[in-house]
Image (cartoon, grey):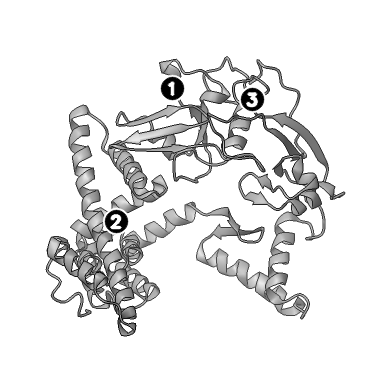
C-alpha cells in the first residue's frame, strides 16, 4: 500500500476533515519553483480524487434524506433511487444514467469496500479506478465484495487501472464462480450495436458481443486483410471496408438501400453551412452535397417550415392522448436526443411537457423526446418539468437546469426574444413525408 494511503486513517471521515483539506490547499497555494511543478500536479490529482470520496459521502447522505421523505409518502424505493440518480446527475452536470451509476458507487465505497474508499479519500486512486472495482464485484454478496476489497488493497495506487480491474475480476470468480457465470449470461443477453460521432466526419460503430463472437469477427476481418492489404490500402482500411461490405451486402463504392435522414438548410447547397444527420450530428456542407448529388441514391427533397406557434406543419394538433405517427416523428427529428439537461441518450418516448392529465395539449409545443429512464423519473413528485418545446426547465432538490432543442443547421439558438422563421430542407432517402393536414397525427 502506498505511503499516502498508510496513515490516512481508517475511514473516509478520517481523511476528508477540514485539516486534510487545508493541507491540500496549502500545498497548492505555496510558492511554485521549477522543482515543485510536478509536486503540485500530483497534489492537484490527489485533491481531485479526495473530493470524489467526499462527493460519495454527500451522495449517500442525499439518498438517505430523500428516502426518509419518500417512505412517509409510500414512494417505491426503486423510484427514490432513480430520482436521486437524476438529482446527482443534475448537480454534477452529467447524464442521469451516470448519476445512478455514481449513486451505486457511493454506497459501495462508503459501506462495502473500505479499502477502496480509503484509497479514494487519500487521493491515490481515481473515481474511475473505484468504479472498475465496484463493477467487477457487483454480482457478489456483501461479504465476498469485502473480501475482494481486502485482496486488492495492496495494489491500490500502485498498479495500472487495467491490472487492478483484472485482479478484482480474478478474485471475484474464485469466490463465487456461479454468480460470475450468471452475470456473463445476463451480459450476453444485452449484446448490442451502437453508433457514436468521431472527429473529421467519421463515426465509431461499436458492437458489444460475447467474447467468442467478438474474437471471431475480428479474426475473420484480420485474416482477409492479411491477404488483401497493399501499401495504397493498408490493413486497417481493408478491415473497415470489408466490415461495411459484409454487413450491408454492397461494396463501399455502391449505393446502399437503407433510410438516411439528412436535415439541411438551403445554404448547404451553395455555401458552407453544415447539414445534420439525426443520430450522428453535423456534417460538412460539401459532404452533404456529395450525398445529394450521388446518382446511386434515390433522393427526394421536401421543404419544411419549422416555426413555433404558426401552425405551419409542426403546429398541428392531435386528437389523440399520445404522440404517434408524423407528429412523433417530427418531435424526434427536432429534439434528436433526450431533452433532459446533460442527457444524450436516444429518444425512446415522446411525451407531454405539461401532462395530459393536467390539461396539457397533444401538440408540437407541448411535446418532447425523452429516454425511457427520464420519462419515468419525471413522474416523481419531487421533480418538476415546466416550459414548452422552446425552453424546458427541470427542477429538483433546489437545483434547476434548462434545455433547448438543437438549432437547425445554420441557424442561431432558439430565443424567446428573437424568433425567426426557419426554412429547412429535409432530404429523405427512400422515405418521403406525405402531404400533411393540420388534423393529421
Question: Number of labelled discs?
Answer: 3
User: Which residue position is annotated with label 2?
Assistant: 105
Q: Is residue 300 left or right of residue 281?
A: right
- Image quarter where the C terminus lies is top right
Nearest to the eye among marks 1 and 2: give it.
1
Q: Residue 314 carries which label?
A: 3
Which residue: 39% across, 48% down?
A: 93
Describe the element under mark 2 as helix, strand or loop.
helix
Where does residue 368 sit, x and y in percent of width and height? Answer: 52, 31
Residue at 68% across / 23% down in the picture?
313
Q: In this view, does 20 lie above or below 350?
A: below
Dot 1: few (<14), some (14–19), or many (≥20) neighbours within 10 Å?
Answer: some
Camera-nearest residue between 51 and 151: 51
Note whether 119 is above or below 346 in the view shown.
below
Q: Which SS class for mark 3?
A: loop
Sequence-wise, the earlier of marks 3 and 1 is 3
Amino acid at each position: 500500500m502506498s505511503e499516502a494511503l498508510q496513515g490516512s486513517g481508517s475511514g473516509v471521515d478520517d481523511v476528508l476533515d477540514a485539516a486534510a483539506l487545508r493541507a491540500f490547499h496549502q500545498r497548492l497555494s505555496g510558492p511554485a519553483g521549477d522543482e515543485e511543478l510536478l509536486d503540485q500536479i500530483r497534489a492537484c490529482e490527489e485533491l481531485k480524487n479526495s473530493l470524489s470520496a467526499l462527493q460519495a459521502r454527500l451522495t449517500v447522505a442525499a439518498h438517505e434524506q430523500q428516502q426518509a421523505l419518500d417512505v412517509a409518502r409510500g414512494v417505491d424505493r426503486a423510484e427514490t433511487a432513480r430520482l436521486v440518480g437524476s438529482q446527482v446527475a443534475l448537480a454534477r452536470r452529467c447524464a442521469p444514467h451516470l448519476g445512478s451509476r455514481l449513486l451505486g458507487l457511493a454506497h459501495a465505497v462508503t459501506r462495502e469496500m473500505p479499502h477502496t474508499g480509503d484509497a479514494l479519500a487519500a487521493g491515490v486512486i481515481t473515481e474511475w479506478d473505484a468504479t472498475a472495482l465496484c463493477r467487477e464485484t457487483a454480482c457478489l454478496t456483501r461479504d465476498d465484495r469485502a473480501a475482494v476489497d481486502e485482496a486488492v488493497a495492496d495494489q491500490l495506487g500502485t498498479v495500472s487501472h487495467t491490472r487492478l480491474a483484472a485482479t478484482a475480476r480474478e478474485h471475484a470468480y474464485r469466490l463465487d464462480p456461479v454468480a460470475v457465470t450468471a452475470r456473463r449470461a445476463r451480459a450476453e443477453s444485452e449484446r448490442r450495436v451502437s453508433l457514436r460521432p468521431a472527429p473529421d466526419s467519421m463515426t465509431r460503430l461499436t458492437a458489444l458481443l460475447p467474447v467468442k463472437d467478438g474474437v471471431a469477427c475480428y479474426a475473420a476481418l484480420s485474416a482477409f486483410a492479411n491477404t488483401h492489404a497493399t501499401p495504397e490500402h493498408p490493413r486497417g482500411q481493408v478491415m473497415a471496408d470489408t466490415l461495411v461490405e459484409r454487413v450491408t451486402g454492397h461494396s463501399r463504392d455502391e449505393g446502399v438501400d437503407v433510410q438516411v435522414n439528412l436535415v439541411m438548410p438551403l445554404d448547404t447547397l451553395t455555401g458552407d453551412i453544415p447539414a445534420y444527420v439525426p443520430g450522428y450530428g453535423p456534417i460538412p456542407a460539401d459532404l452533404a452535397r456529395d450525398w445529394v448529388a450521388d446518382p446511386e441514391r434515390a433522393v427526394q427533397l421536401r421543404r419544411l417550415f419549422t416555426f413555433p406557434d404558426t401552425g405551419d406543419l409542426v403546429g398541428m394538433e392531435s386528437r389523440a392522448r399520445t404522440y404517434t405517427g408524423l407528429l412523433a416523428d417530427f418531435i424526434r427529428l427536432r429534439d434528436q436526443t433526450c431533452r433532459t439537461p446533460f442527457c444524450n441518450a436516444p429518444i425512446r418516448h415522446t411525451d407531454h411537457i405539461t401532462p395530459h392529465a393536467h390539461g396539457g395539449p397533444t401538440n408540437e409545443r407541448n411535446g418532447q423526446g425523452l429516454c425511457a429512464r427520464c420519462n419515468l423519473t419525471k413522474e416523481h413528485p419531487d421533480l418538476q418539468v415546466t416550459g414548452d418545446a422552446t425552453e424546458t426547465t427541470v427542477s429538483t432538490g433546489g437545483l434547476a437546469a434548462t434545455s433547448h432543442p438543437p438549432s437547425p443547421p445554420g441557424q442561431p439558438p432558439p430565443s424567446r426574444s428573437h424568433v425567426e422563421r426557419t426554412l429547412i430542407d429535409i432530404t429523405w432517402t427512400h422515405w418521403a413525408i406525405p402531404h400533411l393536414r393540420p388534423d393529421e397525427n
